[in-house]
Image (spheres, rainbow, N blue to C red):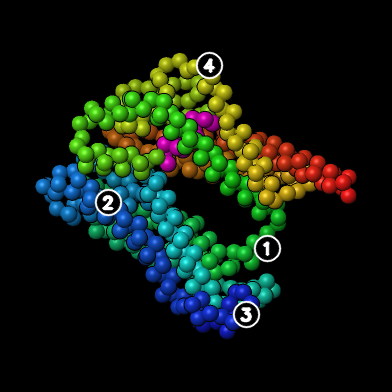
Amino acid sequence: MTSLLAGPDRAVTDGPVDPRHRRPLVLLTTLGGVLAAGSTLMVCLAVGVVGWFLTDAGSHGEPRDGLAVGALGWLMAHGSGVHVQGVPVTVTPLLLTLLAAWATWRIGHRIGDSISGHGPDADAIADGERDWTVPIGIWLFTTGYVLVTVVTSSLVATPETAPSTGRAVLWSILIAVLVGGPALAVGSGRAAIWAAFLPVSLRAAGVTCLSIVVGYLTVASVALVAALVADFGTAANVMSQLQLDTGEAGLYLLVTAIVLPNAAVFTGAYLLGPGFTVGVNTMVSPTVVSLGALPMFPLLAALPADGTTPAWTPWLMAVPPLVAALAAARAQRRHPTVRWEEGALRGCTGGVLAGIVLGLVATVAGGAVGPGRMRSVEPFASDVLVHAITSFGIGGLMGGLAMTWWHRRAVRRAAADA
């Protein structure tokens, strides 16, 4: 608990401590959690009021109705779900979730820098002295974040909307701990110290995992945009049939935009092979497309045609291992090795970890979006997990071995030239 007190006149790095890095830990980290949650909440509240005004120029209801919608949207980004006219809507708008995670990282990083002067210095930590600065900071940061979630839910929840406060609190804890925690550690300098104790192979596998996940979701997003462009006329026709005015159309497109990351994950599930559902008893995959009646939603224009799939679509399942191989090779280029077993371990381990990450993301990308058949719109998460681990693991292995061969070849050439 000594981290709660003013530490000696030194920071984690050597040299005198700047007072800006020894600000009150308890107050600052707690307020940081409140600010991390409140910053995205305020954005959602503002959008809710603007949306309320655009729909009917404010002729119906009151501004607080728009505020309530914005707050419910923020809670949905934290997995709460809502009920709309008695129908559960459990899908999580991942764009808002990513916005919350980004704000949490930025604020957590700055808070970490502000408290970096607390606790022992780098030499003492390296010698094994206990340092509770980051753990206590994470706990207080999470407490502030959860406090905002609980207060927001208690103010806007009604028997009709019925958001799940428990799920929102759980998601808030995960965001604050898994995003805010590392941000505090990086900002305070502790992450660099702790990372020095990790094996090089483990650090390289982590870099490979991140490279594969980012690369694959980027490719999936490009594929989604290409599918939309290819059938843009259908999307435009859907918008015209809705007969929305300019303000309503803008709001509708905004709602569409906040689920674009969800659609990218669905596209990734499609490329892997298992695919996804767009309603009960439906399937969309490279080998089978079985659809029923669909709601009028522009993003659904990207869906393939119902019925027999073209002969070339099963070949799309070669994309995931190829992306994984290229991403693993790119990551290993920054962290080279000439040992075959080392290159194979880094690539395969990073690929398996990336598959697990994508499988977890697939579990939260879908949910119920309406009544009847629309209560199941989601990737086949368990199958996606298995296919992702296999595809990314094999691709990462191949990429790691290929780059190891390249480095060995470069070393031999350098030795011959010398």
Mark 3 to mark 2: distance in Å? Answer: 47 Å
Mark pair 4, 1: CA separation: 51 Å
Q: Which residue is mark 2?
A: 47
Mark 3 lies on residue? 15
The residue lying at 64 percent from left, 67 percent from top is: 193
Q: Badge 3: how crowded within 10 Å, few (<14), some, or many (20+)? A: few
The residues bearing labels 1 and 3 have C-alpha atoms spaced at a distance of: 20 Å
Task: Give the residues in magenta.
Answer: 261-272
Which percent across, then down, holds residue 345?
Answer: 71, 45
Q: Which tag, 1 or 3, sits closer to the chain's start? A: 3
Q: Which residue in the structure is indicated by mark 1?
A: 196
Q: CA distance from mark 2 to mark 4?
A: 45 Å
251 displayed left or right of 289: left
Residue that lies at the very extreme toward the bottom in this rendered image: 9
Q: Secondary structure at mark 2?
A: helix
The reply to whether residue 170 is visible in this rendering is no
Q: Is residue 267 magenta?
A: yes
Q: Nearer the viewer, residue 365 or 50?
A: 50
Q: Amino acid at mark 2?
A: Val
What's under tag 3, amino acid-wise?
Gly
Number of the front mark, 3 or 4: 3
Judge whether 260 appears above or below 172 on screen: above
- Which residue type does callout 4 highlight? Ala
Q: Is residue 389 left or right of residue 114?
A: right
- In magenta segment, residue 183: no
Which residue does the numbered mark 4 point to in the structure image? 311
| Real-space Cα separation, disc 3 to disc 4, in angstroms | 66 Å
Within-10-Å neighbours for mark 1: few <14, some 14–19, many 20+: few
Give, as a three-letter code, the residue at label 1.
Ala
Residue 298 position, x and y percent, is: 32, 32
CA distance for labels 1 and 2: 44 Å
In this rendering, the label closer to the viewer, 1 or 2: 2
